[in-house]
Image (cartoon, helix red, strand yellow):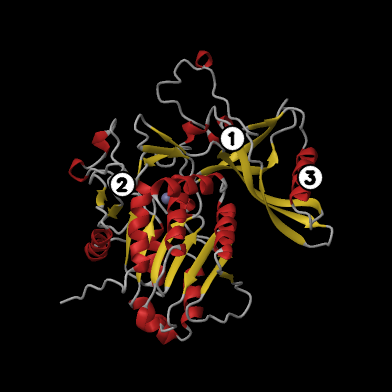
Amino acid sequence: MPPPMLNDALFNFIGATPTPFHAVANLGSILQSAGFTILHENQEWQIEPEGRYALVRNGSLIAFTTGSGDFHREGFRLLGAHTDSPSLQLKPHPRAPSSPYLQFSVEKYGGALLNTWFDRELSLAGRVTVLADSGLACSCLIDFQEPVLYVPSLAIHLDRKANEGREINVQNDLSPVLAQSVSSEEQWHALLLERINTLNEDLTARSVLGYDLFCYDCSPPRFFGLDKKFICGPRLDNLLSCFIGLQALLDKDNTANCMLIFTNHEEIGSTSSSGALSNFAVSVLSRICGSLENHAISMNRSFFISLDNAHASHPNYIDKADTDHQVILNHGPVIKINSSQRYCSNSRSGAIFRLLCREAGVSPQNFIMRSDMACGSTIGPLTSAELGVEGVDVGVPTWAMHSIREVTGAMDPELLYQVSHHFFNRDDLVVISDI
Ligand code: ZN
């Protein structure tokens, strides 16, 4: 796909994907349309050579293609990413009915940059579990799509020190306003049920049993800059990587064993039934490989690339970067390095990625934190440790990570795609032997 089309398709995907539940639904439906068979964990599998399969578990998705069926001889080319993004999540009950507006208190989901959530048109989306007429509990996706929420700032006249390091109290300051004419919890549930019943013809939902509803920025990604060299948009971390991994798998034209491992809950530490610390990927790979012996040999012959956005050096805060390792937008995928293995990269896995980049005609960059600052982390070390597979953490250079709108370069999705596509299409896995 040429760069303008790739970016347009990326913008459409992000616009249609407000939550991890929508991410796996949208990815699953694209994969199914492309001929992938959807598997279910509670059923027996018949994995065929040269097959294409996908499955989901609670906001996470695994998709894979099989080669000759010789898993222990060929290993897997593994590409990881996470499906969730920082957000504000509604608490179960609305705020006290004494308020003249319908408002909810929120919990901070992940490390959101909170000051960016004020004074924006926000929408609401997520998963609602309802009791259906049939007597069964059903989970449905919901997305209001339009602006239905707003968190107004306090005027500067009422807080003269607002520009001098204002603290944000999530419990008190970030409750979004939803409506004025809807005031009770009963009315709110009735509104949810009406939406769900309109969207799902086969379902008559009787009552709301629970929900995971997240606020999100419903303005689509767009280009900016006089030369249109930049992209700003919501949830670039890490839907951009999910989309690029998906395209690389869809465009693959060899018969290698390739797998996407996209997990939920990275922003809150990955400990869940489907996060990177769950048994999801291990369980799927062991079922594919069959015997313990095949699985162990196959993992030893595999390689893992973890995709997640990387910090680009900020032109206004240049002292926050190691100036000997500057990361520039539009200058290529970033290899993330940390000696404490907060990233799974090491010199050898980084070398393999550099070689892949060279063969794909792409120049990589290196990110390493200043030694007097703490380093973040991602799914890379967790997935690598769970699987026992050597890996490398890479991602597109990004400004304003965890802001409601993040920034990357207009060429960066394409550059990441080229090397991801080459990883899946190379004749064999790059192997560097120890001497
Ligand atoms: Zn991320």
Residue displayed at 47% across by 75% down: 285
Toward the top, the furthest residue is 157
3D distance between C-alphas at marks 2 and 1: 32 Å
Residue displayed at 50% across by 16% down: 156
Q: Is mark 1 within 8 Å of ligand 1?
A: no
3D distance between C-alphas at marks 1 and 3: 21 Å
Mark 1 or mark 3: which comes first in sequence? 1
Toward the right, the furthest residue is 133
Q: Mark 2, mark 1: which one is toward the viewer?
A: 1
Residue type marked 2: Ala
Return the x and y of residue 76 as percentages of the image width and height: 39, 73
Determine the secondary structure under disc 3. helix
Along the line of sight, the residue nearer the viewer: 55 or 89: 55
Residue type marked 3: Glu
Toward the left, the furthest residue is 435
Along the line of sight, the residue nearer the viewer: 270 or 397: 397
Return the x and y of residue 262 as percentages of the image width and height: 48, 60
| Residue that carries the numbered disc 2 in the rendered image | 374
Q: In this rendering, is residue 230 above or below 354?
A: above
Mark 3 or mark 2: which comes first in sequence? 3
Mark 2 or mark 1: which comes first in sequence? 1
3D distance between C-alphas at marks 3 and 2: 48 Å
Q: Residue 194 bears which disc, if any?
A: 3
Residue displayed at 42% across by 66% down: 252
Return the x and y of residue 106 as percentages of the image width and height: 60, 39
| Residue that carries the numbered disc 1 in the rendered image | 122
Mark 3 surroundings: few (<14), some (14-19) or many (≥20) residues within 10 A: few
Left or right, 184 with respect to 123, comes to right
Along the line of sight, the residue nearer the viewer: 211 or 200: 200
Residue type marked 1: Leu
Return the x and y of residue 273 as percentages of the image width and height: 55, 64
